[in-house]
Image (tube, rainbow, N blue to C red):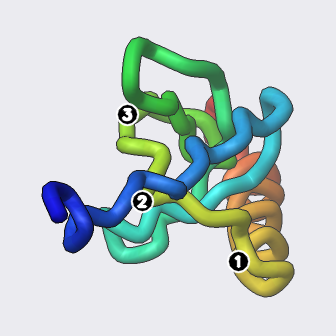
Amino acid sequence: MYGENVSTNTERPPRVPAPGTLLADTSRGDRVGEFQGVAGPYWSLRPVGGGREWEVEPRYVRPALLMEQLRARTARLNARSRGEVL
């Protein structure tokens, strides 16, 4: 029959997280960033310590592990203690 070997696309689009949620970008070596918003088909992430936003396809994003969250927040606090502008 026609189409019997064709699989349907049952993959659901990822849920849009709340702004500020820490996510890991697997396409950039699990780089952790805060979710900023949606820009077309991409999600915008910003480094926890501030800096330049980057865009990533939602399929390459996963929730940051607790250790990754702690590492990112500690890096931010260390930068602030050194007097860096965040």
Label 2 secondary element: helix
User: Decide: marks 3, 1 in contact (CB < 8 A)?
Assistant: no
Q: Is residue 40 placed above or below 63 in the rendered structure?
A: above
Label 1 secondary element: helix
- Horizontal side of 49 relative to 67 (left or right) equals left
Mark pair 2, 1: CA separation: 16 Å
Q: Mark 1 packing: few (<14 Cα in 10 Å), some, or many (20+)?
A: some
Label 3 secondary element: strand
To which quarter of the image does residue 40 belong? top left
Measuring from the top left, give residue 56's x and y in whole percent: 37, 42
Residue type marked 1: Glu
State the residue at coordinates (55%, 36%): 46
User: Decide: marks 3, 2 in contact (CB < 8 A)?
Assistant: no
- Horizontal side of 33 relative to 74 (left or right) equals left
Name the residue tied to disc 1: 68
Counting residues from the start of the chain, the first of labels 3 and 2 encountered is 3
Counting residues from the start of the chain, the first of labels 3 and 1 encountered is 3
Residue type marked 3: Glu
Please tell me which residue lies in front, 28 or 18: 18
The outermost residue toward the top is: 40
Residue type marked 2: Tyr
Label ID, residue 60: 2
Measuring from the top left, give residue 3's x and y in whole percent: 20, 58
Name the residue tied to disc 3: 55
Measuring from the top left, give residue 4's x and y in whole percent: 25, 67
